[in-house]
Image: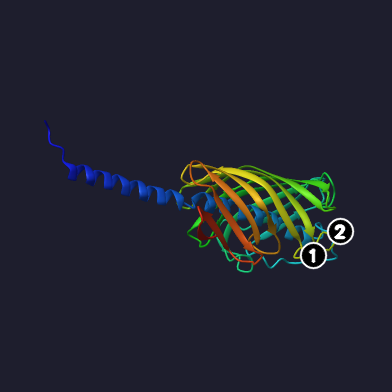
């Protein structure tokens, strides 16, 4: 009869238990999907905010227009803004140029490349369709750590909702972020954006929107995830979303919630997993 080495078995079981425990802790504290969704979500919102700011500066965003063109100090001096309001399909182009430049008065990030928007009618008009796209568009915290953002977004004015507020359906198809490390994040969404404040004024900095709906994507590690907004996201005159909560279902990982805060304009959000909270930068 063979002798059983109980010490060996005990050691093996302990090792397996330790490995499982470490793997479980890693899985339960993995904030990758939440962080990746925030990267795409926030820049997607900023792109629309940039287009809106230019439209309103040029008198084409709010009722009755404005009497003079105003320079938007949010953008870097290198940004060349072109507005074509002659053709039936009007166009705005924001060109940050072929090399990184810093948007000091906006969110302090570096940008290069183009954002382009076309629209079929007035922003307030029911049925107006706005299409927003990017071309060789890069964003980063430094000139050497820039992520490439490829977006195609369609915004449709749906008229007034039951609250008496103008609302927009927003569809993002095949958004792709290529990180400076070479990893990729894919993302798509269908949202509703309700214009709750500022629609009757000529300036854009008093605009406030509430965003509801969902999204789905694949994070940088290749894991699929889905997003459901469980408390409306609040978008106002700030480079980041200021409040709202989303729930992220991430493959076989525990469900996560991401809380954008209580209304303060900052680049922080809180991810909660199984009762444990982690702060991430947007």
Give the image location of residue 63, x and y in percent. Answer: 86, 58
220 or 263, nearer to the observer: 263
Upstream in sequence: badge 2 or badge 1: 2
**Going by the image, does 183 lie left or right of 161?**
left
Q: CA distance from mark 2 to mark 1?
A: 10 Å
**Residue visible at 70% across and 64% down in the picture:** 237
Outermost residue, right direction?
Answer: 64
Q: Which residue is mark 2?
A: 63
Residue positioned most to the front: 1
Q: Secondary structure at mark 2?
A: loop
Q: Position of residue 46 (x, y in %)?
A: 65, 57
Q: Is residue 147 visible?
A: no
Q: Residue at x 82, y 52 (%)?
A: 166
Give the crowd class for mark 1: few <14, some 14-19, many >=20 residues within 10 Å. some
Q: Is residue 30 above or below residue 207?
A: above
Q: Which residue is mark 1?
A: 203
Out of 202 and 209, give the one closest to the viewer.
209
Q: Secondary structure at mark 1?
A: loop
| Nearer the observer, 46 or 34 | 34
Q: At 75% from the left edge and 60% from the top edge, which residue is drawn?
A: 208
Give the number of marks: 2
Quick one: label 2, few (<14), some, or many (20+) residues within 10 Å? Answer: some
């Amino acid at each position: 009869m063979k002798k059983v080495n109980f010490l060996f078995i005990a050691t093996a079981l302990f090792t397996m238990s330790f490995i499982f425990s470490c793997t479980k802790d890693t899985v339960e504290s993995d904030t990758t999907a939440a962080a990746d969704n925030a990267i795409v979500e926030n820049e997607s919102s900023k792109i629309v905010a940039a287009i809106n700011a230019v439209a309103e500066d040029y008198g084409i965003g709010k009722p009755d227009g404005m009497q003079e063109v105003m320079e938007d100090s949010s953008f870097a001096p290198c940004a060349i803004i072109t507005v074509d309001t002659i053709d039936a399909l009007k166009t705005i182009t924001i060109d940050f140029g072929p090399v990184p430049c810093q948007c000091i008065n906006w969110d302090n990030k570096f940008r290069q490349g183009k954002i382009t928007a076309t629209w079929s009618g007035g922003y307030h008009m029911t049925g107006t369709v706005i299409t927003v796209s990017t071309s060789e568009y890069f964003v980063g915290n430094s000139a050497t750590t820039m992520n490439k953002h490829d977006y195609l977004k369609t915004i449709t004015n749906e008229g007034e909702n039951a609250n008496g507020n103008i609302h927009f359906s927003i569809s993002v198809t095949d958004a792709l972020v290529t990180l400076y490390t070479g990893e990729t994040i894919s993302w798509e969404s269908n949202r509703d954006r309700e214009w709750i404040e500022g629609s009757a004024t000529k300036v854009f900095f008093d605009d406030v929107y509430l965003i509801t709906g969902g999204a789905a994507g694949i994070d940088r590690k290749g894991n699929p995830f889905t997003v459901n907004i469980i408390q409306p996201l609040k978008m106002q005159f700030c480079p980041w979303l200021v409040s709202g909560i989303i729930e992220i279902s991430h493959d076989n990982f525990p469900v996560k919630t991401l809380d954008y805060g209580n209304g303060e304009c900052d680049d922080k959000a809180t991810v909660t997993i199984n009762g444990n909270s982690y702060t991430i930068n947007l």
